Image (spheres, rainbow, N blue to C red):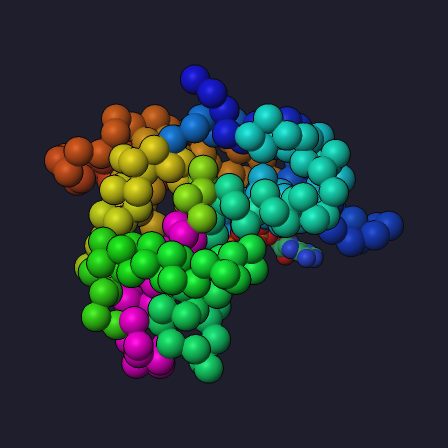
Amino acid sequence: MKKIIIGDHIVKSFGEGDEQHNVLDGVSVEINEGEFVAVMGPSGSGKSTLMFALSGMDSVNGGKVIFDERDLSTVGENELSDLRRTKMGFVFQQPTMLKSLNILDNIILPSMRDNRKNVAKISEKARALMKRVDIAELEKRDITQVSGGQLQRAGICRALLSNPKIIFGDEPTGALNSKSAQEIMDIFSEINADGTAIMLVTHDAKIAARTERIMFMLDGKIVSELKLPRFDGTDMDGRVEKVTAKMWEIGI
Ligand SMILES: Nc1ncnc2c1ncn2[C@@H]1O[C@H](COP(=O)(O)OP(=O)(O)OP(=O)(O)O)[C@@H](O)[C@H]1O
């Protein structure tokens, strides 16, 4: 199976002198193309830092990150930013969108950088994505005129516009009620079924249970892993039970 990401003994430290500590303490992780994974762990265990390291958003102090067969330490800043824009999609807890633009314009904004002349084509693609996630009728709305779940759907459209190889989601359902959260997970499942890899950071066992592999972090290390069959819409309770049992076992 081809790997989209290989993290090899990644070390990330913050602070200096006596204050210095390794937030990532030699983490090795591999994500296959098209895989759906989650990272769980207590607050401060290094989950977001790992996601930033694997996506090249942040540099590392030791080890290396290979993204789509490229060693990120050898890639220049411009190329790295191109890689992020064309091969990675990012979805955060609160989508950062501009108040001065409507939903559609917010979705297409990042893609306009390379394709100023192709507004019509990009808008068409954005509209197809909006239809797919059920927000087609909201394109002219301000970002303050939609619900949190709808805004997150718009955030997902924005992340998908460049046909990324992987979507990184840092607590993408963290601000949503459980119904909206599961609806967003339905969308992620569909995206994943189409072949896009997804890596989610989450505290929520019900979210992690929808993925096929969960990595558990403690103090900057991946201490355990749980594999699940691909989610087919059945046995959600059994899956959640397996995740929570593992959390108990590890003590998180
Ligand atoms: N830029 C930074 N400068 C200094 N310390 C940082 C920085 N970023 C993160 N840290 C520290 O690294 C540790 C891990 O942070 P990280 O955000 O990765 O944890 P997390 O597991 O994602 O936590 P949470 O679940 O609360 O989001 C924390 O102790 C945090 O304070």
Name the residue: 25% across, 29% down.
230
Considering only vertical position in the picture, is 210 above or below 122?
above
Most distant residue in the top direction: 1
Q: Which of 11 and 243 lies nearest the eye of the viewer?
A: 11
Q: Is residue 89 visible?
A: yes
Q: Is residue 88 left or right of residue 72?
A: left
Residue 215 percent location from the top left of the image: 45, 34
Q: Which of 240 and 249 lies nearest the eye of the viewer?
A: 240
Considering only vertical position in the picture, is 64 above or below 219?
above
Residue 246 percent location from the top left of the image: 35, 34
- From which residue to which does the magenta span run? 139-161
Give yes or no for residue 154 being in the magenta stretch: yes
**Count of numbered marks:** 0
Q: Quarter for ligand 1?
A: bottom right
Q: Is residue 29 visible?
A: no
Most distant residue in the front direction: 117
Residue 108 percent location from the top left of the image: 43, 63
Considering only vertical position in the picture, is 122 above or below 12?
below
| Residue 74 found in image quarter | top right
Name the residue: 71% across, 38% down.
75
Give yes or no for residue 136 being in the magenta stretch: no
Name the residue: 50% across, 24% down.
3
Quarter that holds the C terminus: top left
Q: Main secondary structure of the magenta part?
A: helix
Q: Is residue 6 left or right of residue 94?
A: right
